[in-house]
Amino acid sequence: DIQMTQSPSSLSASVGDRVTITCRASQGIRNDLGWYQQKPGKAPKRLIYAASSLQSGVPSRFSGSGSGTEFTLTISSLQPEDFATYYCLQHNSYPPWTFGQGTKVEIK
Amino acid sequence: EVQLVESGGGLVQPGGSLRLSCAASGFTFSSYDMHWVRQATGKGLEWVSAIGTAGDTYYPGSVKGRFTISRENAKNSLYLQMNSLRAGDTAVYYCARGQGGSPDVWGKGTTVTVSS
């Protein structure tokens, strides 16, 4: 199985900050990766697919990059509504589809 | 509007069974892969099963042999039959549509509690 390691597990940031979250795959997964945002009590929402493609309706301050084993989600200017938990998901080698353990973005 | 609505969750004793349903609307259900994903309270997301448009099914080792995913395209419905349930299966279960290889649209979830 492919393991997905996210870092950091949590971070504190202020409105307007640039935030970067990293996901590393235990083996190469090309660009078969998505990023999700989840707010408490709500279902996840896909932000990015194919590692760098922005889901329709998602603000352009979100961006994804990477290929192979290292991937990054960047929020260029953190907004109040962005405080949430973020997950990566690989779909290159399955089963299983595997999520990262999550990164909680909190208000500093 | 694309919508997924789960139902069938509840309280069940260890060793018991439960069948979850997911009603899809707003898209051509038969043309999409479908997934179940779960989340225990305070924990991360865990992929549970998937079914392709041709009826091919996929499971992780943790549920293989106990859970069965199925679909009924005529009713725009997805199902998850869960047998031999354990305390560790307690979670919110989400139904999700697969698009581009990963889930894009998610339902609001249904809660399964396995306890005596």
Image (cartoon, coloured by chain):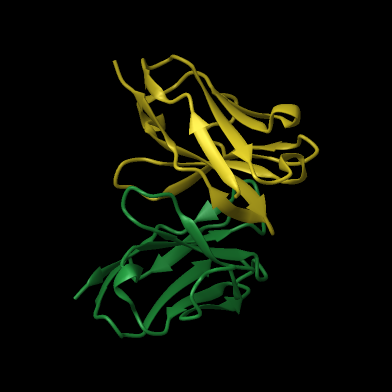
Chain colours: A green, B yellow
Does residue B62 appear in this view? no
**Residue B77: % across, % down:** 65, 31
Q: Quadrant of residue B72?
A: top right
Depth check, front residue: A32 or A105: A105
Depth check, front residue: A98 or B93: B93
Depth check, front residue: B7 or A101: B7
How many labels sit on residues? 0
Kindly give the residue lying farthest to the left in the view shown: A108
Kindly give the residue lying farthest to the right in the view shown: B54
Identity of the residue drawn at 50% across and 33% down: B6
Depth check, front residue: B51 or B59: B51
**Residue A55: % across, % down:** 58, 68
Residue B66 falls left or right of residue B77:
left
Identity of the residue drawn at 60% across and 48% down: B2
Identity of the residue drawn at 46% across and 59% down: A100
**Residue A46: % across, % down:** 52, 61
Quarter of the figure with the C terminus of chain B:
top left
Kindly give the residue lying farthest to the front in the view shown: B1
Q: Is the residue A46 above or below the residue B80 in the image?
A: below
Q: Quadrant of residue B53?
A: top right
Residue B37 falls left or right of residue B99:
left
**Residue B112: % across, % down:** 39, 28
Q: Is the residue B24 above or below the residue A37 in the image?
A: above
Q: Is the residue A23 above or below the residue B93 in the image?
A: below
Does residue A5 appear in this view? yes
Identity of the residue drawn at 31% across and 67% down: A83
Q: Quadrant of residue A108?
A: bottom left
Residue A105 falls left or right of residue A70:
left
